Each structure stands twice: as structure tokens, then as C-alpha cells.
Image (cartoon, helix red, strand yellow):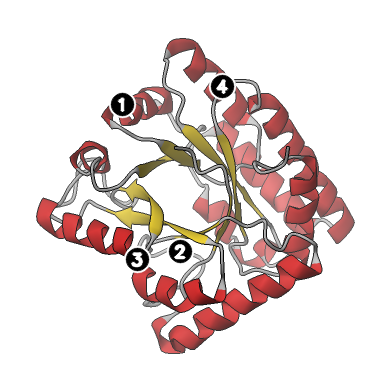
Amino acid sequence: MTLNTIALELVPPNVEHGPQRAVEEAHKVLELAEQFGIDGRIGHVMIPGLIHEDDDRPVEMKPKLDVLEFWAAIQPELPGVNGLCTQVTAFMDESALRARLTNLRNAAIEGIIFVGVPRTMNDGEGCGVAPTDALSLYDNLVENRGVILIPTRDSEQRRFAFKCDQGATFAMTQLLYSDAIAGFLADFAAHTAHRPEILLSFGFVPKFESKVGLISWLIQDPGNDVVAEEQAVVARLADSGPDQKRKLMLDLYKRVIDGVADLGFPLSVHLEAPYGVSAPAFETFTEMLAYWAPNKS
């Protein structure tokens, strides 16, 4: 079964703001979707399960509402919208993780993306279950088992093939600011029969980015020239006026879609506004979805 969806990422609010802030965020999404003519088209909300990362994170990480608490607050406000989430596995033992996944599934979270340790740690570190092990351990519990795909990362072809061998049914890409995913999937398709669903991730870049640098920090990979080029694209988007920004994002979206559409992978779209949903973000997303969308015949 494929998700075949437009997923909008919503980050749980800080605990200090409580569930009411979550409800307000859901209402804002509904208002913006109606304003720009895409009401009823968002199929999923993707909720990241955040943990503390590097101390150099440009935006301070304060305690957030838990995924389940956030979803309980917004689900009644978003009729017809289903839930996806990321779940860090590496700090839970097998039984604790099973209980957590059971609670997520009982709350109607339709797909779960298994995530490992922060980048300050090495793969395999952590006292709990590795994401690749979780894919097979919980295949009878979680039907839609997702992984993160970073097409610019060294050795990602091998890493992604192993995740598919372990039972991944879909992959959510890192935020895309180049069409590197097209070449990656073309090579992957040439060497393996795996065809998991791909959630193509696109993030709106507001002017704030030029001062804060959150998006550039999120996609960083020191020493990687392709990522450095993507960071330059992010900087250009941040410095562009609204019309030029939309044109640049639409051109990127077209290159990605045209590059991957015929490779045999089921495709969905994951949309993100890392600084918060806004009218400019929804206006940009609407133009992108007018070009191609998973539920558009």
C-alpha cells in the first residue's frame, strides 16, 4: 500500500505554550489551505519526534509537546488528514519501542519513519534498537515503515539498499535544494529491484534564513561540495524577493519531478516551512502542486 499523499510537516509547539498553540496552528493551516485553493488536498501531517542535537543549532531547542500529545490536539481540527511521524529508536530497548509504536498506531499514526542517533554520534551508537533493525522487528505492527534518505550523503546507495532489504516501505528525503535525488534514484533503480515510495521533501526559505541559518544548518555536510552548492541555493532563495523566490522553487520542483517521475518509484510530496507555516509558503506550495501532485490525475 502506498501513501500517495501530500504531507505537510508541523513541528510540535514548545511545552510552555501547551496544546492550545497546537490547535491554533491547525486552524492556521486550514485557513491558508482555503485561501490558496488547496483545502482538502493535504493528506497527512508529518510530525517530527525531536530530540536534543548539536549545541550549535541556530534555533534553541526547548522542550516540545510529545508527538502523541500534539496529534491528539490537532487531529480533531483536521478532518480527513492522517498522521505520519518520525520516531527515534536508538534510545529505547525492544519492548519499550514496541509499546511506543503500539501507542502511535492506536492513535491512527499511519506511517512511522525510524530515525537513529543525532549526527553528533556514530551509526550504531545508542543503547536501544537501530532503525534498520526496527524495520524488520516491527513489520507486523507498522505497515508503513519509513526511513530517511539523504541523496547527497556518501555511501547512501549502499545504506539505502540495506534499509530496503530490511523492510522499508517508504523513504522521506532530506530537504531538496538540488536535483541530486534524480541521479541517485536512477542509479539505485539500475542496480536493485527495490521500489519503495519516495516522499520528496521541499522546504520554503523565508528571508529570516539569511540571519538565522536554520535550513543551511539542517542540510549541512562539511566537506561535501554538492551540499555546499545546495546551501548556496538556500542563501539565494533567502535573499530573493517573493516572485523570484517562487520562480526558483518552482524551477527546482520541476527539475526534481521531471527527473524522477519515470523511474518506477511511487511518489509523494512532503512540504515543510521550517520557520512556521505562512501565506508566502502556502502560495509557493500551491504553485508547485499545480505542476504535479500525487493525487492529481
Q: Is residue 48 above or below residue 202?
A: below
Give the mark toward the camera: 3 or 4. 3
Q: What is the x, y in percent for residue 116?
A: 29, 48
Q: Secondary structure at mark 2?
A: loop
- According to the picture, the residue beneath numbered tag 2 turns out to be 57
- According to the picture, the residue beneath numbered tag 1 turns out to be 162
Q: What is the x, y in percent for residue 234?
A: 68, 50
- According to the picture, the residue beneath numbered tag 4 turns out to be 264
Q: Earlier in the sequence, mark 3 or mark 4?
A: 3
Separation of residues labelled 1 and 4 (CA atoms): 19 Å
Q: Secondary structure at mark 3?
A: loop
Residue 250 left/right relative to 28: right
Q: Amino acid at mark 1?
A: Phe
Q: Earlier in the sequence, mark 3 or mark 1?
A: 3
Separation of residues labelled 2 and 1 (CA atoms): 30 Å
* Residue 107 tag number: 3
Q: Is residue 100 above or below residue 150?
A: below
Mark 3 and mark 4 in contact? Answer it, CB < 8 Å.
no
Q: Amino acid at mark 3?
A: Ala
Q: Is residue 105 above or below residue 182?
A: below
